[in-house]
């Protein structure tokens, strides 16, 4: 009986893992700032910063948006990203460069590592709403 219970639990974990894609990752290091710039296109990083988030609450919100986005194929139809996002760490570590397509209210947003093979990651509608509130300020 115990073996059957273990098998059922393991099967549930495997099924859950198959349903949900891999999440985006960041370095497990303190973030100094998150910078946003108008995107010039996939594969390019516009280093002319429009605005930056430097306060802890804003960084935590953006960090949550990124870390809860899960890998899922998305058709972006050559559409330019809305923003290039640069995650700057407190230590002298490389900056994470991410492209961002901001979704409509209650719709997913799309994120993509700048250096990738086209893998896209989707946020939830709630995370898009948080993101949109942050970008309006």
Image (cartoon, helix red, strand yellow):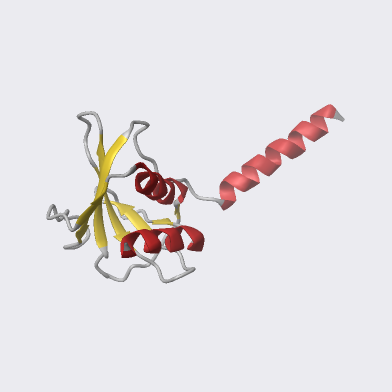
As rendered, which of 61 and 111 lies closer to the eye? 61
Side of 26 where 40 appears, left or right: left
Position of residue 24 relative to residue 41, above or below, is: above
Task: Please report the residue visible at 27 percent of the width from the left and 65 percent of the height from the top.
Answer: 82
Of residues 12 and 107, the one nearer the viewer is: 107
Residue that sits furthest to the right in the current view: 1
Residue 11 locus on image (x, y percent):
69, 41
Is residue 61 rendered to the left or right of residue 32?
right
Find residue 24 and report its image quarter. top left
Left or right of residue 112: residue 69: right
Location of residue 40 by image quarter: bottom left
| Quadrant for the N terminus in the image | top right
Residue at 42% of width from left, 51% of height from top?
65
Q: Nearer the viewer, residue 105 or 12?
A: 105
Of 28 and 137, which appears nearest the observer? 137
The answer to which quarter of the image holds residue 128 is bottom left
Residue 86, visible in the rendered structure: no
Where is residue 85 shown, x and y percent of the image? Answer: 26, 52
Query: Where is residue 29 shown, x and y percent of the image?
Result: 34, 31
Location of the C terminus by quadrant is: bottom left
Residue 5, given in percent of the width and then of the height, sits at 80, 34
Residue lying at 73% horizontally and 37% vertically, measured from the top left? 9
């Amino acid at each position: 009986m115990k073996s059957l219970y273990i098998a059922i639990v393991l099967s549930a974990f495997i099924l859950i893992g198959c349903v949900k894609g891999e999440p985006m990752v960041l370095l497990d290091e303190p973030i100094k700032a998150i910078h946003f710039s108008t995107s010039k296109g996939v594969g390019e990083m516009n280093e002319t910063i429009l605005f930056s988030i430097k306060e802890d609450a804003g960084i935590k919100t953006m960090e949550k948006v990124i870390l809860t986005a899960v890998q899922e194929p998305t058709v972006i139809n050559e559409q330019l990203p809305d923003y290039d996002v640069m995650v700057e760490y407190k230590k002298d570590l490389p900056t994470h460069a991410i492209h961002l397509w901001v979704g409509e209210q209650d719709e997913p947003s799309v994120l993509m590592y700048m250096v990738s093979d086209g893998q896209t990651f989707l946020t939830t509608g709630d995370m898009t709403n948080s993101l949109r509130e942050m970008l309006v300020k």
